[in-house]
Amino acid sequence: MTASVPHRTTSAYYLQAVASFGFATAALALGIAYLPVSAWMRAFLGVGLLYEITSAFTLAKVIRDRQDEGAITSRVDQARLEKLLAEHDPFKVDGV
């Protein structure tokens, strides 16, 4: 018995986030390309841009993984509590 995890975001929100990320990356890349500096400086800034993007993805994954871990722990604790409540009989008398 596996319960599917409901989606927390809508398709429109996902599309907006992807479009915003693409626009910001393209705008910054164009800005770096047209800077009035030497090619070495543009290359350095381009590598910095790529490093920032990969760091952002890594941070987002770490945060998501931590939240998922907390949700799993919460579900296990909830299942244990439900089992204890199901097995508890308030009218049972011990030793009779």
Image (cartoon, helix red, strand yellow):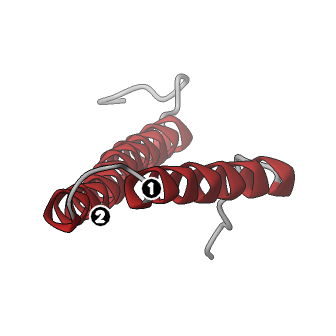
Query: Is there a contact, CB below 8 Å, between mark 2 and mark 1?
Result: no
Kind of residue sitting beneath label 2: Leu
Location of residue 55 in the rendering, given as x and y in whole percent from the top left corner: 25, 54
What residue lies at 35% left-to-right and 42% top-to-bottom?
70
Left or right of residue 48: residue 73: right
- Residue nearer the viewer, 2 or 82: 2
Residues packed near mark 2 inside 10 Å, few (<14), some (14 to 19) or many (20 plus): few
Location of residue 19 in the rendering, given as x and y in whole percent from the top left corner: 70, 56
Name above or below for residue 91 compared with residue 85.
above
- Residue nearer the viewer, 7 or 94: 7
Q: Quadrant of residue 32?
A: bottom left
Which quarter of the figure is the N terminus placed in?
A: bottom right
What residue lies at 52% left-to-right and 41% top-to-bottom?
82
The mark found on residue 50 in the picture is 2
Look at the numbered disc 2 and give the secondary structure of its residue: helix
What residue lies at 77% left-to-right and 47% top-to-bottom?
13
- Residue nearer the viewer, 81 or 6: 6
Front position among marks 2 and 1: 1
Q: Quadrant of residue 91?
A: top right
Kind of residue sitting beneath label 1: Tyr
What residue lies at 34% left-to-right and 46% top-to-bottom?
73
Numbered marks: total: 2
Location of residue 39 in the rendering, given as x and y in whole percent from the top left corner: 22, 67
The mark found on residue 72 in the picture is none
What residue is disc 1 on? 34
- Residue nearer the viewer, 39 or 94: 39
Q: Distance between the Cα atoms at labels 2 and 1?
A: 17 Å
Which quarter of the figure is the C terminus placed in?
A: top left
Look at the numbered disc 1 and give the secondary structure of its residue: loop
Left or right of residue 69: residue 48: left
Which of marks 1 and 2 precedes in the sequence? 1
Residues packed near mark 1 inside 10 Å, few (<14), some (14 to 19) or many (20 plus): few
